[in-house]
Every structure is written in C-alpha cells, then in structure tokens.
Image: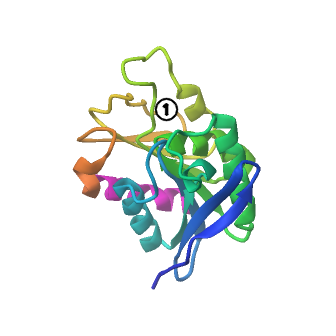
Amino acid sequence: MTTIAAPVEIDTPHGPARVTRHEAAEPRALMLLGHGAGGGIAAPDLLAATKVALEAGVSVGLVEQPYRVAGRRAPAPAAQLDAAWLAIVAAQGNDLPLLFGGRSSGARVACRTATEGGAIGVLCLAFPEHPPGRPEKTRLPELLEPTVPILVVQGANDPFGVPAPVGNRAVVVLRGDHSLKSDMPGLRAAVAAWLPLVLE
C-alpha cells in the first residue's frame, strides 16, 4: 500500500520549491526526482519511474524547482537549481538512504549535487549530453561527478545525444527520442533491474 501526500512547499535560497511525496509502505530509501527544463513532474517517464520505485519499496519525492512554482518556464541558472535542490534534500531529513534523479535538466542537477547531497545512486532519464546539433558543447563532465552507481535511460534517437556506459555508469538505450514515451515498458524494466543493485 502506498500513499500520496499533499504537495509541500519548501523554502530555498531562490524561493519556495514544492515536493510531492509518494510513500512506500515500508520504505527502504527515498528517491528525489526533478523535472525537465520546461516540463513538470507529470512527465510520463517520471511517473513510470515513480511507480517502479514504489513497487521496490522506495518512496519518491517529485520535486518542482522554484522557477516552476513561481510559474516561469525558463529555467534558472545551474547554480540556483543546485542550491535549491540541496535545500530540498536537507528538508527531507536523514532517516532513509537517498537516491537522486530526474529527466533531462533534472538529471543534470541530480548529477551535480549527488556527492554533496549524499546520494547512494543517480537515475538519469534522457540526460542531455549536449545541445541538439552541438556535440562540442558536451555535458559529460557532469555525468562523471557522481562516484555512486548511475543509470542513464536514453532514447536511441535523442537529439541531445546518447552517453556511453563507463565505470559506474550503466546506460540503457530504448527506441524513441528525448521524451522516452515510445518504450515505457523498457524504461520500467531498466529502473526495476537497477534499483536492487543500488539498494543491496
């Protein structure tokens, strides 16, 4: 049995953020998931990952960054996103192991803050390796920051690129593009296979 709590506003250095907690019956960990740059927490891949996590006994907090809570679509600078995320992490308490994750921009935030925030694993849905058509503007250094296990779930035709597996980074490539909507069963299977490896 899982429960969904009412969204809670959390003060951050850059305005109020919002977290919607989905609680597993006997949680083994808490996974915080952030949205993409222009999207929200109702993205299909975020909801699919949430369902899989709950089935694995992992509670989930769906995080809305302050700029989205304020009604803006244009994302805040990276430093502001990271500072807000860490404030949200601190507000969750420290009674459960933490997993960080998100889609696209949210995955970047999760990678950049994983070490400081004490995450035991990072889930990256559609990590934007580079801007479309600009492979020289690589963001791969962000994927190298976490020292904990990372799972990247990527669409084979993603115009933002497809990172390669290396070291602590596993990569599952699905049919489809940046939205990951084309293969939800594949996404669910990838997350379901990865979570026990991180939690064991």
Q: Is residue 116 magenta?
A: no
- Disc 1 target residue: 166
**What kind of secondary structure does the magenta stretch mostly adopt?**
helix
Q: Left or right: where does residue 138 sit relative to residue 90?
A: left
Can you see residue 89? no
Q: Which quarter of the picture shows residue 78?
A: top right
- Image quadrant holding the N terminus, namely bottom left
Q: Which residues are magenta?
A: 186-200
Q: Nearer the viewer, residue 70 or 18?
A: 70
Q: Left or right: where does residue 90 sit relative to residue 57?
A: right
Q: Is residue 190 magenta?
A: yes
Can you see residue 168? yes
Give neighbour class at mark 1: few <14, some 14-19, many 20+ (Cα, 10 Å).
few
Is 116 above or below relative to 54? above
In terms of secondary structure, where does tag 1 sit? loop
Residue closest to the far top: 136
Type of amino acid at the residue the image marks with label 1: Val
Q: Position of residue 193 (x, y in %)?
A: 40, 58
Q: Position of residue 110 (x, y in %)?
A: 59, 46
Q: Residue at x 50, y 39 (%)?
A: 169
Q: Left or right: where does residue 115 sit relative to residue 74?
A: right
Q: Nearer the viewer, residue 83 or 200?
A: 83
Is 183 above or below relative to 112? below
Q: Residue at x 42, y 30 (%)?
A: 164
